[in-house]
Image: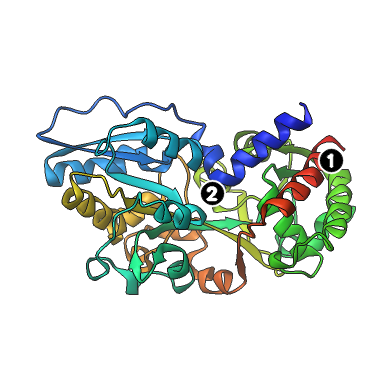
Amino acid sequence: MSDRSIRKRAAGLRLAGLLSGTALLGALALQPGRAAAAEELNALVWCDHTDPALIEPFEKAHGVRVNLKEYEGTGTALALVEQSRPGDWDVFVIDGVDVPRVAEAGLLAELPADQLPLDDLFEQVRMDDVTMRDGKRYAIMEKFGYNVVGYDKSKVDPADMRDLSVLWGDKYAGRIAVYDYYIPLMDLVALHLGMEPDDISAETLPQIREALLALKEKSAMVGEVVSSTTALATGEADILLGGGEWAVAVMQGDNPDLEWVLPEQGGILWSQSIAIFESSEKKDLALEFVKYIMSPEGQARLATSSCFWGMPANRQAGAVLSDEARARLRWDEQDEFLANSYRYFIPDAELDAQMLDVWTEFLQH
């Protein structure tokens, strides 16, 4: 793969955030197969929202049809909106980090705070600085999780997985898969080096580079969502650096030896949000959909979607989730995990280009 194609692919991943790769699992097509309804709602979503177990209860309760279109990357979604007529789209599931620029562009409608369960959200994922602008709320975080360490507990010592430095040693050399997304992985490398993600700069990048190249020597493979999780599931690798509940929880039913954990050095927090398009002509129905998704029942179904699992933003979902689901999500450790997590570090354009150059070298090393 050329440097140019690697740069283009990596830049697309940054725009999309963590789960853009997951959206590749679905086609860019409206969800088929539901009976005609009196009213329809059109939503641009990630694949976790296409699970009938999540959507059908809302459709039945409101006598409507929800048309779902998966997309790959926020840039792709915005292009779809630009090519559509005003009012074609009602609901938007969007990477948390992209909310400010989309709200600033005037594409999102204000959400009525008094109709949302804001007080029930995990404090660290309210992210008012991201979801609000000029005192108005334009999105609400609906689901989150971690880029941390996934592993097969039958093949590694689980205690070792709580220490990032172990992965740079010889004990698990040749048994590590690395998730191919440069932002969270460089953030994790920074934590390994005793930095915080915000400490990444032109001055510290040489240290990040050196640690990455050393990690590559210990790794079995580097891959995107599907190939990296497949490596863990098939035994090609015993550890997935950058993995988390999103990579492991959905597979634990078939392989209970798969596990994930946030190491003592910390983890990297991803988040996704839900919003309503300003141009929607069905804002009342769209708001009902947002309220359903944010309800304890909707949150529990979204958290355990057949596409990928993640933590529900609403704490009250814990009362709805099964004991098995809570265990897979490590529910009882969430307060500790959140306190020791960092948001994605988003560099400026100049530093971003430098980071991509280092990542390209890492991939080709």
- Residue 12 lies, in percent from the top left, at 60, 39
The three-letter code of the residue at mark 1 reads Glu
Q: Is residue 195 above or below residue 171?
A: below
Residue occupying the point 29% across, 68% down: 117
Q: Callout 2: 10 Å neighbours few (<14), some, many (20+)? A: many
- The residue that disc 1 covers is 361
Relative depth, front residue between 153 and 270: 270
Dot 1 lies on which element?
Answer: helix
- In front: mark 2 or mark 1? 1
Answer with left or right where residue 50 lies relative to residue 354. left
Residue occupying the point 53% across, 41% down: 20
Answer with left or right where residue 297 lies relative to residue 363. left
| Colouring | rainbow
- Residue 129 lies, in percent from the top left, at 47, 69
Task: Say if residue 234 shows up in the picture.
Answer: no
The three-letter code of the residue at mark 2 reads Trp
Answer with left or right where residue 194 lies relative to residue 119. right
Dot 2 lies on which element?
Answer: helix
Residue occupying the point 50% across, 31% down: 25
Q: Is residue 305 above or below residue 342?
A: above
> Can you name the residue that lies furthest to the front here?
105
Relative depth, front residue between 125 and 165: 125
Looking at the figure, which quarter contains the C terminus? top right
Which badge, 2 or 1, comes first in the chain's sequence? 2
Relative depth, front residue between 364 and 228: 364
- The residue that disc 2 covers is 246
- Residue 185 lies, in percent from the top left, at 71, 52
Residue occupying the point 74% across, 47% down: 353
